[in-house]
Image (tube, coloured by chain):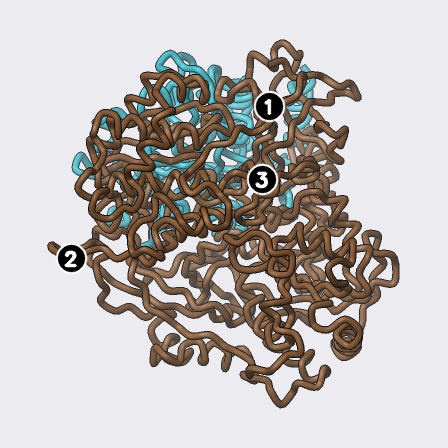
């Protein structure tokens, strides 16, 4: 199963209700957004004058750039398939891709608030909320969850429910009979480019000119931080484990912080 | 434990930088005792109760709501699942009602201005003291000048009961911007021609073609109206949008007619002439139901395709294309009546032309046409009738000066303002403002300020400290639409093509008001008692008020509550049945293409085009419109909406911008033809989607009152640049799109090339 969202630009009128309903539902501070609308055009496209909107949210990517960069301690976590009850146990850091529903989620308790994931996302879909800082962190990373708690309660995602244009459709992309899959067959695409191909599962459908304008919003490069961070995170994880086992966390931590800072300065 | 010191520093800076806005948030927390956010917000559906009976008033479309309430805190608003109008949907503004309720800038207590009008210093006073002052001052005006010495400016449902009281007092002059700066001509010219007011009841879902002249659905978000428009598109209706600007609606249109501003009437006359000429109009309907068909034909004959094309600066073939499309699909075409019509001061004639076009296509009472939607009715609350020394109707200014025979309800505001300044034909010395920000609605702000300065007493009641509140002597804090009983909303299923149903809903509070905010029934009754009218009070409280409105329906608040806030019953299709004849409530009983009533009043009896002034060299016409997440200036201080669209970008033609050295994001001020400069600035948006002879900004920005900490000086107040008006003889409504602007960047004035 892979949850996904379709946004039909033929219907979207750019009313911003999605962005605000999300903010209300999840108490997102005004400094940040899990769900946004950018107004595009009127501008010339190869297919004529166009004006449309970029209603954006987390893409819950098939190959998320934000997951592997998480430097938090890993834990064995057991995931459960809501439908079949099947379980799977995996070792994950503070953010992961759910093996059953395909959404990308965060464990806020374990999040360090370092922002590596936010830096790694080419879509800017994540933010670190400093209001949620606790003894162990500077804040917590946050983003769209595809409203999993609502979906599990039998509700639509908040942005889908409020959409007066019925421009947003939520469902299982792996189910060929689902409404979202039908849109994919009709040509709904994610915001990808030559260098950014991480399998976005929030997809857009629309006429040629609107889609041409929308595609100007596709990220052209993977964030630099993402490659550097993932390398560092790769170094960090085994080191932390080792450090833990040797009861030398303090020293190892200091060393790691130092190396990170040096990297940042470069 | 933090491993990224850089980010920590960044966050620190960021939170300091952001402190300007969240400061208000901090205050809100201190005042409302809200604890720190939990790590994982529970979501609006967890541990909340659903309170029904809400009716939105973030705009005036009035969608039906439910509130998710946790403890005594409203956490989220959603469309009432029972609604057959908006359903579970809400627009951005509807969703943001939460931020109006908990806006820390909101008025909390009655206040007395101990500073100057326009530069107030507020002293918190008790309701008792505030109402005593109001009663004394209003009575003093009545004693000295009669009830005609009082003027009322109002907007919205909360003003209905106060208005009933001012009627009882015999106050003859009241003004609502909904008519005089917006829909006045749309209502009155349609009435004069068709004998009914269609509002915007046009059956777009079931149309085969739509014509939108200047209405930008999509930027103007009225929920079920947008749903109708989109359903029409989905059903394959061909959309024509006539607009100098590539609006949200134009972006979805099949034909965009990029018309020269001010020439819309010529366009409509040209369409009619082509249809007459080619004999493709709806002959059967027109001959049977219209008065003055021959005279109209003769009258529009001068508007050949070539002449129309030249006047409107559009390709001739577009006129042919549009005329053919509409005629081919008649009568199932939506000739949208429009909404805001106070454009150029010749707008009554334009709406008449629109009505005539609708008529010669027979596009009414049928699928796709203008429809007479059958809604339930509800009652009114009146105070007892009293004999006044002077008949208020005769004392209404427009009657006294014998002008504006086709005016909408109320007194033209500029006429009232002139009187407040001159004292002629009689003095007006007290002003009551209820729920309207007249600084942002009435053009020629310097005249408004002069009128305000001339008053003996000004009472303002509102929810937030809007610009006009700065001129109040006494300022009263009102409960918002989510904290009071009030308006009764009646309607049908949103798509007239679906199974006919009717609904009725009455506004009920979703939460209790905080601080000392009060509902209008309480305020007016307490005022009335102090003015010696206690014995005549018609309803004791707001619940009784609503039950009185509901009386004829057999419903009560209690019954509606049991029905989750909405009563639904079978309805009636608005389409004529086979063999059923349409009725027109005009003098002649027919659709009056030719209006004798207008002729009698010395106005053109057939829809007539008059040219509007051209921009002076170096200037472009300022056209204004809606921002999709704002309702005029009412929402400017809403933190969530300001987050979505904080200001009103200046749309300027990209080629002109290039010549002027302007690029996207440049910060600019505007200066108009009279040398009036905007107080605040906005950003430039260069686009091929606007003509070179005009620029566009959304209305409602550039709040003047520093007490509105979110909206203060954000964007440009278009109305501050409306120093010139064209007062229409038929209605007394002022056209405002006759103001022209150029750009100021870095202190340098830049002409806009033609």
Residue drawn 48% across and 53% down? B94
In which quadrant will I find the N terminus of chain B? top right
Towards the viewer: A86 or B557:
B557
User: What's the residue at 48%, 56% (across, down)?
Assistant: B42
In the figure, the shade used to draw chain A is cyan
User: Element under label 2?
Assistant: loop
Same-subunit check for callouts 2 and 1: yes
Q: Position of residue A121 (x, y in %)?
A: 49, 27
For mark 1, does the 10 Å Cα neighbourhood hold few (<14), some (14 to 19), or many (20 or more) residues? Answer: some
Q: Tell me which chain appears brown.
A: B
Residue that mark 2 sits on = B580
Residue receiving disc 1: B614
Q: Residue furthest top?
A: B659
Distance from label 3 to label 2 (Cα)? 40 Å
Residue highlighted by disc 3 = B735
| Placement of the C terminus of chain B among the 4 image quadrants | top right
- In the figure, is residue B749 to the left or right of B158? right
| Residue B171 found in image quarter | bottom right
Chain of the residue on which disc 2 is drawn: B
| Res. B458 in view | yes
């Amino acid at each position: 199963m892979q949850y996904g969202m379709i946004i039909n630009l033929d219907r979207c009128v750019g009313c911003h209700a999605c962005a605000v309903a999300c903010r209300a539902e999840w108490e997102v501070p005004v400094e940040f957004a899990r769900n946004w609308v950018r107004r595009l055009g009127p501008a010339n496209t190869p297919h004529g004058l166009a004006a449309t909107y970029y209603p954006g949210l987390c893409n819950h990517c098939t190959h998320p750039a934000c997951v592997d960069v998480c430097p938090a301690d890993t834990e064995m976590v057991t995931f459960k398939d809501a439908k079949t009850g099947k379980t799977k146990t995996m070792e994950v850091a503070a953010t992961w891709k759910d093996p059953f529903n395909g959404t990308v989620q965060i464990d806020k308790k374990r999040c360090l608030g370092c922002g590596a994931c936010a830096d790694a996302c080419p879509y800017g879909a994540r933010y670190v909320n400093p209001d949620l800082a606790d003894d162990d962190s500077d804040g917590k990373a946050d983003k769209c969850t595809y409203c999993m708690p609502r979906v599990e309660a039998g509700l639509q995602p908040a942005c889908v429910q409020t959409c007066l244009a019925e421009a947003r459709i939520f469902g299982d992309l792996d189910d060929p009979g689902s409404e979202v899959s039908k849109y994919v067959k009709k040509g709904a695409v994610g915001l990808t480019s030559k260098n950014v191909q991480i399998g976005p599962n929030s997809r857009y459908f629309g006429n040629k000119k609107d889609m041409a304008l929308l595609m100007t919003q596709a990220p052209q490069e993977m964030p630099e931080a993402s490659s550097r961070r993932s390398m560092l995170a790769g170094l960090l994880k085994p080191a932390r484990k080792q450090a833990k086992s040797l009861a030398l966390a303090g020293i190892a931590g200091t060393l790691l912080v130092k190396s990170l800072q040096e990297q940042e300065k470069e | 434990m933090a491993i990224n010191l850089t980010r920590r520093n960044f966050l620190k800076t960021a939170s300091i930088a952001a402190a300007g806005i969240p400061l208000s948030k901090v205050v809100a927390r201190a005042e409302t005792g809200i604890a720190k956010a939990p790590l994982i917000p529970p979501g609006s559906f967890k541990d909340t109760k659903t309170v029904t009976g809400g009716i939105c008033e973030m705009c005036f479309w009035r969608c039906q709501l439910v509130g998710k309430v946790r403890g005594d805190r409203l956490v989220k608003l959603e469309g009432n699942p029972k609604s057959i109008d908006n359903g579970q949907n809400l627009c951005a503004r509807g969703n943001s009602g939460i931020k109006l309720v908990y806006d820390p800038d909101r008025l909390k207590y009655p206040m007395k201005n101990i500073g100057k009008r326009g530069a107030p210093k507020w002293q918190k006073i008790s309701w008792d003291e505030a109402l005593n002052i109001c009663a004394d001052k209003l009575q003093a005006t009545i004693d000295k000048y009669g009830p005609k010495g009082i003027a009322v400016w109002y907007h919205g449902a909360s003003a209905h009961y106060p208005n009933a009281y001012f009627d009882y007092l015999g106050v003859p002059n009241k003004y609502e911007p909904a008519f005089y700066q917006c829909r006045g001509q749309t209502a009155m010219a349609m009435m004069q021609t068709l004998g009914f007011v269609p509002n915007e009841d046009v059956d777009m879902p079931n149309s085969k073609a739509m014509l939108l002249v200047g209405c930008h659905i999509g930027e103007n978000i009225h929920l079920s109206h947008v749903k109708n428009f989109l359903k029409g598109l989905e059903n394959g209706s061909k959309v024509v949008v006539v607009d100098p600007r590539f609006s949200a609606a134009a972006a979805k249109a099949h034909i965009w007619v990029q018309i020269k501003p001010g020439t819309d009437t010529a366009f409509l006359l040209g369409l009619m002439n082509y249809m007459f000429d080619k004999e493709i109009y709806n002959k059967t309907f027109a001959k049977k139901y219209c008065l003055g068909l021959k005279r109209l034909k003769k009258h529009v004959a001068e508007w050949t395709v070539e002449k129309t094309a030249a006047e409107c600066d559009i390709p001739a073939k577009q006129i042919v294309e549009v005329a053919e499309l509409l005629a081919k699909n008649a009568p199932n075409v939506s000739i949208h009546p429009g909404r805001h019509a106070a454009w150029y001061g010749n707008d009554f004639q334009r709406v008449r032309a629109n009505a005539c076009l609708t008529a010669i296509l027979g596009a009414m009472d049928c699928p796709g046409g203008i429809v007479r939607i059958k809604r339930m009715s509800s009652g009114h609350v009146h105070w007892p009738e009293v004999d006044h020394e002077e008949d208020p109707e005769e004392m209404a200014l427009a009657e006294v000066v014998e002008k504006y025979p086709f005016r909408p309800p109320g007194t033209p505001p500029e006429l009232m303002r002139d009187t407040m300044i001159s004292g002629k034909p009689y003095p007006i010395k007290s002003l009551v403002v209820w729920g309207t920000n007249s600084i942002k609605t009435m053009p020629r702000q310097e005249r408004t300020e002069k009128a305000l300065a001339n008053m003996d007493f000004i009472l303002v009641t509102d929810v937030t400290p809007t610009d006009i509140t700065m001129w109040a002597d006494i300022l009263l804090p009102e409960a918002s639409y989510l904290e009071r009983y009030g308006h009764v909303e009646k309607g049908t299923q949103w798509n007239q093509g679906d199974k006919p149903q009717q609904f009725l809903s009455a506004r009920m509070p979703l939460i209790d008001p905080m601080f000392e905010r009060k509902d209008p029934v309480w305020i007016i009754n307490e005022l009335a008692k102090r003015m010696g009218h206690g014995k005549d009070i018609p309803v004791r409280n707001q619940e009784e008020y609503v039950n009185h409105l509901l009386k004829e329906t057999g419903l009560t608040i209690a019954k509606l509550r049991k029905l989750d806030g909405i009563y639904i019953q079978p309805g009636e299709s608005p389409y004529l049945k086979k063999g059923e004849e349409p009725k027109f409530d005009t003098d002649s009983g027919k659709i009056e293409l030719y209006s004798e009533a207008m002729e009698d009043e010395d106005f053109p009896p057939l829809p007539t085009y008059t040219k509007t002034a051209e921009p002076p060299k170096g200037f472009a016409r300022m056209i204004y419109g809606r921002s999709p997440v704002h309702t005029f200036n009412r929402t400017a201080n809403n933190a969530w909406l300001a987050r979505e669209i904080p200001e009103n970008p200046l749309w300027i033609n990209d080629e002109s911008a290039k010549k002027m050295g302007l690029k996207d994001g440049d910060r600019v001020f505007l200066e108009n033809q009279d040398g009036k400069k905007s107080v605040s600035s906005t950003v430039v948006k260069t686009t091929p989607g606007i003509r070179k002879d005009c620029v566009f900004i959304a209305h409602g920005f550039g709040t003047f009152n520093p007490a509105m900490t979110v909206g203060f000086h954000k964007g440009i107040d278009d109305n501050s640049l409306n120093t010139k008006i064209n007062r229409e003889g038929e209605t007394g409504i002022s056209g405002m799109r006759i103001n022209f602007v150029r750009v100021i960047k870095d202190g340098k004035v830049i002409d806009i090339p033609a």
